Image (spheres, rainbow, N blue to C red):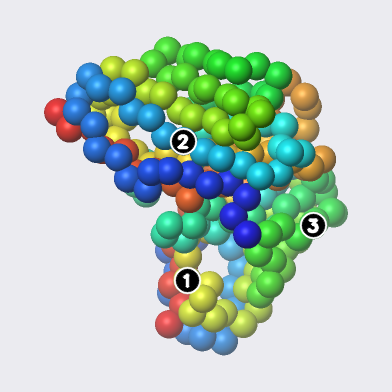
Amino acid sequence: NAGVTQTPKFRVLKTGQSMTLLCAQDMNHEYMYWYRQDPGMGLRLIHYSVGEGTTAKGEVPDGYNVSRLKKQNFLLGLESAAPSQTSVYFCASSYFGTSSYEQYFGPGTRLTVT
Amino acid sequence: QQQVKQSPQSLIVQKGGISIINCAYENTAFDYFPWYQQFPGKGPALLIAIRPDVSEKKEGRFTISFNKSAKQFSLHIMDSQPGDSATYFCAASAGSARQLTFGSGTQLTVLP
């Protein structure tokens, strides 16, 4: 089991460029999440999904879009990158059952927007 | 609006000492309170978690104390070890998708 994987690990963008971050999980989890981590601010939820074909906004959704076309994949898109989106992005997934609420995190993508 | 407040921002403890990290929350709808541990360059990993119907949960050297009336919870690390040096995040969950709201993190350093 690879768990949660994220692609790419690092990326540098110029202001206005677009990109897509890919998250994949092999645990057959229903729920998937995208967070950003900034110094002194913990992790903040960007978007999340409770199943294939469904997405919802989190705490800081502006400037991002997501898609969940397949259960195992959750994509995060930046249409026009801004320096304020420089951050470390983490994807997570969890099982929908009541026995465990644990979220499993990927290794992160470090994004720099210049 | 920071719904989960965490302190201290950083903590230095001697090997064998007790590390204590505190969190306070505002939203009474939160129903699950996990602590995550993060090493540099890695994603956070669940350390221990508690539901609001119990006041304490212990797993090895790690204990969560929970005070529902005060809306506070804390992590105690007994016999702290250099390998415990990491960033610790408290979090709280609410909503049908168990969305997590994280505290700002505590960087723990355990001196050998």
**Callout 2: SS:** strand
Taking the image as shown, residue B15 lies to the left or right of residue B22, namely left
* Residue drawn at the location 47% of the way across and 71% of the way down: A86
Residue A24 image position (x, y, % from top left): 63, 48
Q: Residue at x 72, y 63 (%)?
A: A66
Q: CA distance from mark 3 to mark 2?
A: 30 Å
Label 1 marks a residue whose chain is A
| Quadrant where the C terminus of chain B is found in the figure | top left
The residue depicted at 55 percent of the width and 16 percent of the height is B57
Residue type at tag 2: Asn
Farthest right residue? Answer: A53
> Which of marks 3 and 1 precedes in the sequence?
3
Using the rendered image of the protein, determine whether residue A27 is visible from the camera's viewpoint.
no
Residue A56, label in figure: 3
Tag on residue A33? Answer: none
Hey, which quadrant is residue A9 in on the image?
Answer: bottom left
Q: Position of residue B5 (x, y in %)?
A: 53, 47
Please say if B6 is above or below B85.
below
Residue behind mark 2: B22
Q: CA distance from mark 2 to mark 1?
A: 29 Å
Figure check: A70 above or below A26? below
Query: Mark 1 sits on what residue?
Result: A86
Subunit that carries the residue with mark 3 = A
